[in-house]
Image (spheres, helix red, strand yellow):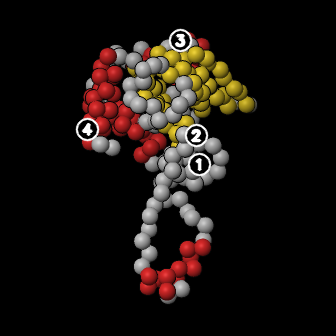
Amino acid sequence: MILRVTRILAVPLAILASGLGATACEPAQPAKGASASGLPTWEGHAREVFDDGIDPSAVGLTLEGPSPRLDAHLRERAQTADVVSRVRVQTVTVDSVGDQQTYHLGIEVGTPTLAAARLPERSFELSIKSSSSAFGIAKSFDARLRGQVFVGFLKRYGVDEGEPVLHWHLAPDTAEVVAAVKEAVALREIAGS
């Protein structure tokens, strides 16, 4: 499924007649915050929301944390992600190039999803680079992540050239998180967006 962003610009006749309309022959530039593919770019606030991170509480590293209903990022993730679902880690692999390691989590999307999925795929590979907030968790838990179930938020972002890139966040699979996600999705549906 390809998402396209279309902008309709009204150009006054006077501008066209004055010869300034010659710039209309220039190649179209993507809107600010959008890539050539029409997908949003992963910059600014988007890096905080879809941070390629794993909540420490999702792997039992914290006992208490803020209520999921009070987490503004959780609500935004639930309302804007392409896939919101329970996900199971099927595979954990690591690539090493020199001193740099990258972990890869092969995940399977559970059914039913917690929100209508905007991507048809059911399997994804999540990359965790050493600069990612999830790197410490991936390195500490390594193969023990296999079989873990999380509430996953996946979103595609465009790049200037090439295939879209997937960014994500994994939260604990608890009744409280699932309830907060369903509430956020219902609010989006009520608002009509």
**Image location of residue 49, percent across then percent down:** 42, 38
At label 3, counting other C-alpha atoms closer than 10 Å, the crowd grade (few under 14, some 14-19, many 20 or more) is some
Of the image marks 1 and 4, the number of the one nearer the N terminus: 1
Please tell me in which quadrant of the rendered image residue 65 appears: top left
Of the image marks 2 and 1, the number of the one nearer the N terminus: 1
Of the image marks 4 and 2, the number of the one nearer the N terminus: 2
Q: Pointers 1 and 4 in contact (CB under 8 A)?
A: no
Q: Nearer the viewer, mark 4 or mark 2?
A: 4
Q: Which residue is mark 2?
A: 165
Marks 4/2: CA–CA distance: 30 Å
Q: Quadrant of the N terminus?
A: top right
**Residue at (50%, 88%) from the top-left corner?**
18
Q: Nearer the viewer, mark 1 or mark 4?
A: 4
Q: Which residue is mark 1?
A: 159
Marks 3/4: CA–CA distance: 35 Å
Q: Which residue is mark 3?
A: 147
Q: Pointers 2 and 1 in contact (CB under 8 A)?
A: yes
Q: Secondary structure at mark 3?
A: loop
